[in-house]
Amino acid sequence: LSTTTNTRIQNDISSLKIYPNPVQEKLICSGLPQPAELKLFDISAKLVLFKKLTSGDNIINISKINSGFYFYEITNNRLVKKGKIIKR
């Protein structure tokens, strides 16, 4: 039972939190159970940032990215979490 539970927890990125939103300079990704990849796309679906994330908490400097609306995709093995952020 514990092996199944641990596998489920390690493969689950639903507890991942992305904040603050709106963001000015530093985007925080917290609660990653294992390494993942972050992709940030502008509204025309152009990839503007790719970052490898470690397990736990990550701070991503996005100060050089223009203000606007962005879509993120965080991939952990085959699991994906998608959402939107506003960069001010």
Image: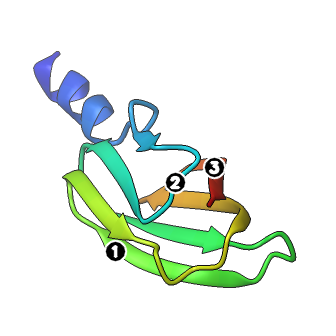
Q: Secondary structure at mark 2?
A: loop
Left or right of 29, for residue 86: right
The span from disc 2 to disc 3 (Cα, nearest Å) is 17 Å
On residue 82, the disc is: 3
What residue type is disc 2 on? Val
Q: Secondary structure at mark 3?
A: strand
State whether residue 36 is above or below residue 17. Answer: below
- Looking at the image, which is closer to me, 66 or 30? 66
On residue 31, the disc is: none
| Label whose residue precedes the other's in the sequence (3 or 1) | 1
Q: Residue at x 43, y 65 (%)?
A: 25
The span from disc 1 to disc 2 (Cα, nearest Å) is 19 Å
Q: Residue at x 55, y 44 (%)?
A: 21
On residue 52, the disc is: 1
Q: Secondary structure at mark 1?
A: strand
> Residue 79, how many percent across, how many down?
51, 50
Q: Are marks 2 and 3 in contact (CB under 8 Å)?
A: no
